[in-house]
Amino acid sequence: MTVHIAPALTTASPAVVVTNLRRAYGKRIVIENLNLRIERGEFVVLLGESGCGKTTLLRALAGLDPIDGGRIVAPRRPAVVFQEHRLLPWDSLWRNVSLGLQAPDARQRAAAALSEVGLSERLDDWPRNLSGGQAQRVALARALVQEPELLLLDEPFAALDALTRIRMHALVRELVAVHRPGVLLVTHDVDEAITLADRILVMREGRIAFEHRTRTDGTAPITRAELLVELGVVAPSLINA
Amino acid sequence: MSNLEQTVSSVALDPHREDNSTLSQKVPFEISRRVLQLLSWLAPVVLVIVWEAMAQGGFVSPQILPAPSKVIKTAFKLTTTGSLLNDLVVSLARAAAGFAIGGTVGFVLGTLVGFSRVAEAAIDRSVQMIRAIPFLAAMPLVIVWLGVGEAEKIFLVALGVTFPIYINTTLGIRQVDPKLLELGRVQGLSTLELIRRIILPGALPSILTGVRYALATAWLALVVAETIGAQSGIGFLAMDAREFLRTDVVVLTIVIYALIGVAADGIARFLERRLLAWHPNYGAAR
């Protein structure tokens, strides 16, 4: 296993600590010397252009890919929501939500999780009868029913229409406030980052190149334009002008 | 579809047309579908009636083709004297035994090869080579090995069943969405749970397709096996009847084989509807 699972010592222990992470595909280095600490209840959004290594980082944290150096220490196995809902088409919604849940009251827990995402009536329904937004809500319920200390979101709203996405943002914020996992959301969407994040990270060439705390430090909120500069989409001169 | 919409909209735009004309365009479409359905059942019924009339009228010798009514009478007579039911049970038991053995072997080998590249390297080429032999061509050899008893017949059925199950099981397991397997790992499933919750359900549509093919080959194998050296069974009944020029019995056995084939296909389709209720292409409407 690449993710070190250490028992939680105190309530103040972080959701995950990454030290000197290195990841390479052959000779091509994708992540180098990356350090990251996410507290429980903290919402971290990771931005970066395609190929900057952000999905690689998420997959390493999820334990899906091996790492080539450094350490990842997490108290428990993280939960993941992917860009696609990845519901099992042959299982009812509650069976999907309780997948991997080792508990005698799995159905009740799944029911509770489904009602949290507003689908309490659909316990025995099939995934094929859901809209894209509903399916993604079930995927969210499936992640949260595990009571994770770290929740990894890999562009989970990218395939949704704009209105559904806004509703999902509100729902995710609510759920994170209740369950208080540490969250790492990977996205391309600058507005999404500003809306959701306690802390925004911008990744460039395998490192965290920029970091901004949005809510706790009392400074002026970061603007869309400033983030676009950090992402290399807009030249700095355009803002100053 | 778009053609239809175009016609409808052009009709609607045409001020000289009356609304009725669009209605009368739709109605014959619905009627003709019902008529076609009726026709599809009517045709075989008419065929049987013509056959009966020809036989009754003496246009066809009963030695060549007995009347349907005669075949039904024979069926009734053979059932009451007891030999037909017994032969039917014997044939079904052979098919079931052969299917169980061949199905198990095909499923186990298919599962091994589906999961393991090592197993594929070790097994697949040999299986494919044996599969290339028309299994009925192996019959003389099988008779030399096993004689002309039950074992030979069950073996032939099993041989015919093994390959469709094997191929479709392997294919089904290979086609399981790797993204769902990844999800299983993320959710912390053990290997056994991964197989039970994700791999087997994912492979099931393909496996059931294999079952349908296998049922067809099982019958084919049984017919051939029973025509050689059988002492009981439907095939024996047919061969015995041939000796005595009892074409009514021969036709009866052919009809029975056909009916059982239809029934087997029905069972396979029932299984698909039940087990694949989740699947948009198989499942019954909610």
Image (cartoon, rainbow, N blue to C red):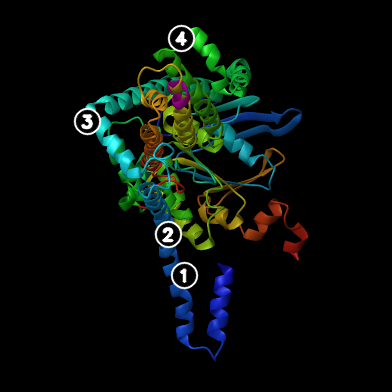
Q: Is residue B223 magenta?
A: yes
Mark 2 crowd level (few <14, some 14–19, many ≥20, 10 Å Cα): few
Looking at the picture, which amino acid does disc 1 mark? Phe
Mark 1 or mark 3, whichever is nearer to me: 3
Q: Disc number at residue A44?
A: none
Mark 3 crowd level (few <14, some 14–19, many ≥20, 10 Å Cα): few
Regarding mark 1 in the picture, which secondary structure is present there?
A: helix
Please give left or right for residue A112 compared with residue B9 in the image: left
Mark 2 or mark 3, whichever is nearer to me: 3
> Disc 4 marks which residue?
B147
Please give left or right for residue A13 compared with residue A115 in the image: right
Regarding mark 4 in the picture, which secondary structure is present there?
A: loop
Query: Looking at the picture, how far across and down is residue A203, in whole percent?
Result: 66, 43
Which of the pair A137/B227 is nearer the observer?
B227
> Disc 2 marks which residue?
B39
Q: Disc number at residue B29?
A: 1
Regarding mark 2 in the picture, which secondary structure is present there?
A: helix
